[in-house]
Image (cartoon, helix red, strand yellow):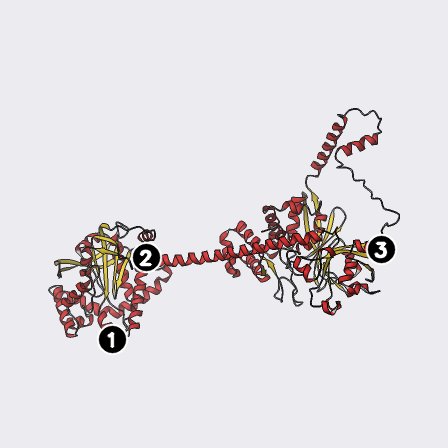
Amino acid sequence: MVLPLLMLPLLAPFRDVAWSSGERTGFGTGSRIGGQYGFINTCLQSLVIEKFGEETWEKLKSCAEIQDAFMTYTVYDDVITIKLIQEACKLLGVSMEAILKMFGEYFFKFCKMSGYDRMLRTLGGNLTEFIENLDALHSYLALSYQEMNAPSFRVEKGTNGTMLLHYYSDRRGLCHIVPGIIEAVAKDFFNMDMMMEILNKSEEEERTGKKEHVVFLIVQKHYGQEKKTRSLQSAFQRMKEKYLSLSVCPVKKSHWDIVRSIVIFGKGNLQNLFEPVYPERLWIEEKTFCNAFPFHIVFDATLRVKQAGVNIQKYVPGLQTQDIRVDDYFTIIHPQVTFNILSICKFINSQFVLKTRREMMPEIWKKQPALKLRGQMIWMESLQCMIYLCSPKLRSLQELEEWNMHISDIARHDTTRDLILLNQQRLAEIELSNQLERKKEELRILSKHLAIEKKKTETLLYAMLPEHIANQLKEGKKVAAGEFKTCTILFSDVVTFTNICAACEPIQIVNMLNSMYSKFDRLTNVHDVYKVETIGDAYMVVGGVPVPVENHAQRVANFALGMRISAREVMNPVTGEPIQIRVGIHTGPVLAGVVGDKMPRYCLFGDTVNTASRMESHGLPNKVHLSPTAYSALENRGFEIVERGEIEVKGKGKMTTYFLIQNLQVTENEIMGRTENLENKEEASAMEIQDSQTVAIGRYEDSQHLLPNTDVAYAYDRSASEENGVKGEDSKESSDEHQCPDQTNTRRFGHDNMHSSFCILL
């Protein structure tokens, strides 16, 4: 951010652009050219954040579909700012006029906050001078900011302190910015309250391209006028007292001499009686004048050239021809008015920029850039002629060389010499600032991408290891093994998984497991249990590890009930019916720690892991099998649990186990973590699934009283499995021991064949 860019759009924050003649009101959708500097969008961003908050800006940026940041010296398409303003009107529920005026007020405040109010104050001693000097300031700034095309202003003084402000712009619909800035300037710099009202809007016929012409009525009222009067009287009294304190002058003074002495002693604050003295004849010859002012043109009311400076003749040879018109060789670039005396006189206080017509130049010069002149128009009433005192408008030494000019071609008294050299340095600073901003933006984008990639990496890492464990590993620390006195471990697998694998394509198996595991993974977040790992169709979770909690058994139990419900939504690719799972739960102590360097894993060790695995392998399809310790942890906790009886557990002997039926205190939606608005839909789907299984489950339950104990059911199940060519319990257990020597997981393939069991029971 630098001063010139702040001043660049002071009364028109958006660069003027050409719009198609088909547009009539508002911003329109006509074709347009050009853009604006990034500072304007940055200022708009600051306004929204300060007035409405960071979240509002993020919403506005998303609605307008714009980038994250703007660089100060980069020119952006007007569409960006237009979309920002239009979306702001929709988002904030305010009119376009209110948004533009608010922006105008804030833009002036933004300039002051940046420390440039002192520079702004130098434009004029009153509001009229301030506005009239804006055009000259814009013309000067255009040396450094070539993309600038600011509007023009003309002030007419009225009666009773009123003014008419004529605003000429190349774009429609932005005139409401002007009152916001002008009122802020008047109140802050000139201590006056004022009101601005649009008197007329029209297409300005005098300006090229039919530009917009808006006339504002300015009614002003000074603040604290009585206070100023008292202050002036007090100052006069102090000056008088100082005068009387001086030694008595021996020469007698008249009354008016005393008053005059007071005024002079007061440093001339009241002395406004200066009158210039003019000679009877001009003491300079024609040749000397044309050499002293090498760039000037005198033309009459009909635009006929009467005389020209020596150097302007050198670079525009056609001016040496007698009786030519100045508009044959030049066009007016700023202010954009038609080339006639009446239009020029209206903007007599503006700085005029003229450009040579390329077609009127010598053939060998037509490939060179068009020469631009900037200067002042002065009307000579007695001669009925206009003199244009000007200098070449050159931005840098490079442009000086392109026109084969030298510093010596410019008069020594002309400050254009200094401006070229100073602007050359400023252009170099701007280029450095551009490079710095580009590098800063690149670093910001890289940093943003790095943060995104870091978050992805952390998400993946936290999916493999507990967060606090992963953070310790990232910091290079060794993770010590921990002992947990009590926790609850769950194992599950898919019934007849081996048969499914044998009858399906690999992709079908992957899709089935991915669907099932995705649903289980979501439930781990719902019930806050830790997923240890998966191997094939086996799924292992734990509650109370790695963060100890008192209700670990309840969490795992609710998770198991959710698994059973979720399994109904996963189809067996062979039969097209819902898959069946076995679930086993055991509660006890474990050791936990990270093992391995290449692919470190957080593993659980101890007999509790093995017992939980046995509960799963000795369970029944669609049943949640509980060990005695798991039953004790869930007893009197609101769960419906039935005793299975005493069974033989390999490696453990006889053990009384239980089946978890349901949680009596929560609904199915709460178990699944569903929102209430989906309740009816989910219940209907669940009822359809339950209806399809009612007969089979009813037959199994009815047969329970016919069987002396569950060992008979296992005997039938084992014999049925052997008849279908599936390994029995012994081969399954040996497979468990072979694949999981650390007893953290077991592999089970085709232990129970539910369809065979139902046939035998029938």
Residue that lies at the very extreme toward the right in this rendered image: 280
The mark found on residue 286 in the picture is 3
Q: Is residue 33 left or right of residue 57?
A: right
Which of the two labelled residues, at mark 2 and mark 3, occupies the earlier sequence position? 3
Say if 52 sits above or below 536 in the image: above
For this rendering, which residue is in front, 363 or 720?
Answer: 363
Q: Quadrant of the C terminus?
A: bottom left
Q: Could you tell me the amino acid type at mark 1?
A: Ala
**Residue 201, visible in the rendered structure:** yes
In this rendering, which labeled residue sits more in front, label 1 or label 3?
Answer: 3
Say if 261 sits above or below 698 in the image: above
| Residue underneath mark 2 | 526
The answer to whether the residue labelled 2 contacts the one labelled 3, judged by CB atoms less than 8 Å apart, is no
Q: Is residue 440 left or right of residue 457?
A: right
Q: Hey, which quadrant is residue 241 in on the image?
A: top right
Q: Could you tell me the amino acid type at mark 3?
A: Glu
| Residue underneath mark 1 | 503
* Number of residue marks: 3
Which of the two labelled residues, at mark 1 and mark 3, occupies the earlier sequence position? 3
Q: Is residue 719 left or right of residue 636?
A: left
Rendered residue at 74%/30% (across/down): 237
For this rendering, which residue is in front, 301 or 700?
Answer: 301
**Residue 713, visible in the rendered structure:** no
The answer to whether the residue labelled 2 contacts the one labelled 1, judged by CB atoms less than 8 Å apart, is no
For this rendering, which residue is in front, 615 or 98?
Answer: 615
Gap in Å between the C-alphas at discs 2 and 1?
Answer: 34 Å
Q: Could you tell me the amino acid type at mark 2?
A: Val
Percent across and percent down for residue 463 are 32, 58
Tell me the element at label 3: helix
Tell me the element at label 2: helix
Tell me the element at label 1: helix
Mark 2 Cα shell of 10 Å, populated few (<14), some (14-19), many (≥20) = some
